[in-house]
Image (spheres, rainbow, N blue to C red):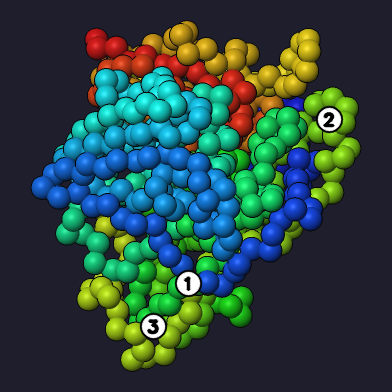
Amino acid sequence: MTQPIGRRALLGGAGVVALGAAGGWWWVARESSDPAAVTGAALVEPPVHTSTGGLLDVRLVASEEVRALAGSDVRCLGYGASVPGPTLRVAPGDTLRVLLVNDLDEPTNLHVHGLQVSPTGASDDVFVSVAPGQQHQYVYEIGEDHPTGTFWYHAHHHGSVADQVWRGLFGALLVLDPAASARTERVLVVSDVTLAGGAVAGVTRHDRMAGREGALVLVDGQSAPEVVGAPGTVERWRVVNACTSRYLRPLLSTVGAAAVAGAGVVARDGRDLASGLGVGEVVVPPGGRADLVVPVGQEDLVLTTAPVDRGAGTGGTAGGGTGGMMGGASDEQPSTLLTLRATGPGAPPSSSPATTAPPGPSGTTAPPRDLRDVEPDRRRTLTLTSGMGQGMGGGMLFGIDGRTFQAGRTDHTVTLGTVEEWTLVNDTTMDHPFHLHVWPMQVLDGGEAPLLLDTVDVPAGHRVVVRVAFDAFPGRTVYHCHVLDHEDLGMMGTLEALRP
Ligand code: C2O
Ligand code: CU
C-alpha cells in the first residue's frame, strides 16, 4: 500500500505501522488525577434518531454539562444528554436536517465525516462558524446512490477541532437501507480521553504537537462495557474511531485468547469490502471506521485494540523540555474495548428475529467504479510537512506542501467529471491519516479488490497513491490530517471543485 521514500524509510518500518513498540515521549498519562474508570457495565448505546418518510430532522445542542463518562460524572462537552451524541440513521435518498444550537462559550460547527454530499450552502460547509448562543440549520441531501454504511459527525471549527472532539462533540451517523439490516447491530464509537478532577483534562503544547492520546479508551463513553450475545447468531459491530489522534488495531478473540472463526472486517469507511479482511489485519486511523462481523458461539468474546506506534519522531526536534513527558503509561498492553458474554442456548430471546443472516455486505448500492482502470486526467503530489516555527513559543508548524492552513486561500482547483491521481507524501517522522472531504479516495495497491477510504494512513517517510473521481458537488472544501491536533496546527488545505 505504501512505498518508502528514502532515508526516513527506516523510521517508518516496513510500510505499515509497527505493533507494540514502546510509546515515545508523547505517550502521556496523567498519573494520579484519573479516577478509576468503572468497567464491565452493560453497554448503553447512544439514542438513535431514524428518518421517516425520507426525512430526519434533528436538533443538536452543543453544550458543556456534567454527563456520564467512563462510569463517573464528568464535566464535558456533548450533543444532548450523552457522549457520544445521538446516532443519526438515514437512508439513501433522504434529507437530513440538523439544527446545530451552540450553547458553548466558544464557536463551533459540524462536519458529516465521509458523507458524499455538497460542501456548500447549508450542506457540509466546514468554513461555517456558529458563534456562542447562535444556531445554524444544516440540510444534507443524501443521494439515492449514496453508499450505505458507517459514518460519523463531529465538530470541525478550525483551531478547536481536537479540543472539542476530545471533550465530547461527536456521534455516529448511519446510512442504511431500511430493509437491509436484520441481524443484531451494535454501534461502537471509540474515543479516548483523560479525566482530571471531574472534568476532561487539558493538554500541553507537546501533546498537541504529537497528537494527544487519552489515558482511557472508551466505547460509547464507557470503559470496557459488556454486551450479551446469543450463541448461533452473527452480529455486525460498527466501530468508529472518534479518537483525536489514537490509531486502533482491533483484535477479537475468545476470553481464552483463541481466534474467532468466521469473524472479519466487512466494511471500511462506510463502504462494503468486496472481500472481507481478518480482524487483526486492519489498522483504523483516527476518523476511520471498520465494520466487523462477529459470529457468537458458546464462548465469551473480547474486543481489544493493540497499541499502534505512529512515530515518535517529534521527540528529537520539538526542542527542550520533552524529558518530563517520558515515561507515563507506555501502554504496551492492548486496551479492552468490549466484552461479549455468550449466553447459553435458550437464554435471552433475541430482539431481532433475523439475526442468523450470514455475514457479508449489507449494502444495496452499486459497487463504485474501479479507478485502477482509468487513466487519470491529472496527477498531483501533496506533501505532508512539519518544521520548527520561528519566534516566540516556536512550536512545530504543521502544513501541507510547507504551508499552514489558511481558510481564504484555495490550494488546489479540480474539475468536476475528472479523475485525479494524488501521491500523498509524508515527509515527517510521524504517521498522518489523510482525510479528504466529500470524495472517497481509492487506494492503489490496496489489494485485490478496490479499496475506497475517506481517511488514508500515510506512514512516516512513505508515500501512498490514491485516485479520486470528482464526479459531483461543485464547491470548496478541505483535506487534512485527522490527527486533529495536527489539523488545528495547520496540516490542512483547501480544494475547490469547479464545473467544467
Ligand atoms: Cu472527520 Cu475534516 O474531518
Ligand atoms: Cu498528522
**Element on which disc 2 rests:** helix
Q: Distance between the Cα atoms at labels 1 and 2?
A: 44 Å
Quarter of the figure with residue 436: top left
Q: Which residue is mark 3?
A: 231
Side of 13 where 469 appears, left or right: left
Instruction: Name the amino acid type tagged 3.
Output: Pro
Crowding at mark 3 (Cα within 10 Å: few <14, some 14-19, many 20+): many
Q: Position of residue 385 (x, y in %)?
A: 65, 21
Precedes in sequence: disc 1 or disc 2? 1
Q: Which mark is residue 42?
A: 1
**Residue drawn at 27 percent across, 20 percent down:** 121
**Element on which disc 3 rests:** loop
User: How many numbered marks does the figure carry?
Assistant: 3
Q: Distance between the Cα atoms at labels 3 and 2?
A: 51 Å
Instruction: Name the amino acid type tagged 2.
Output: Gly
Of 310 and 391, which appears nearest the observer?
A: 391
Quarter of the figure with residue 72: bottom right
**Residue drawn at 89 percent across, 37 percent down:** 323
Precedes in sequence: disc 3 or disc 2? 3
Side of 187 where 382 appears, left or right: right
| Number of the front mark, 1 or 2 | 1
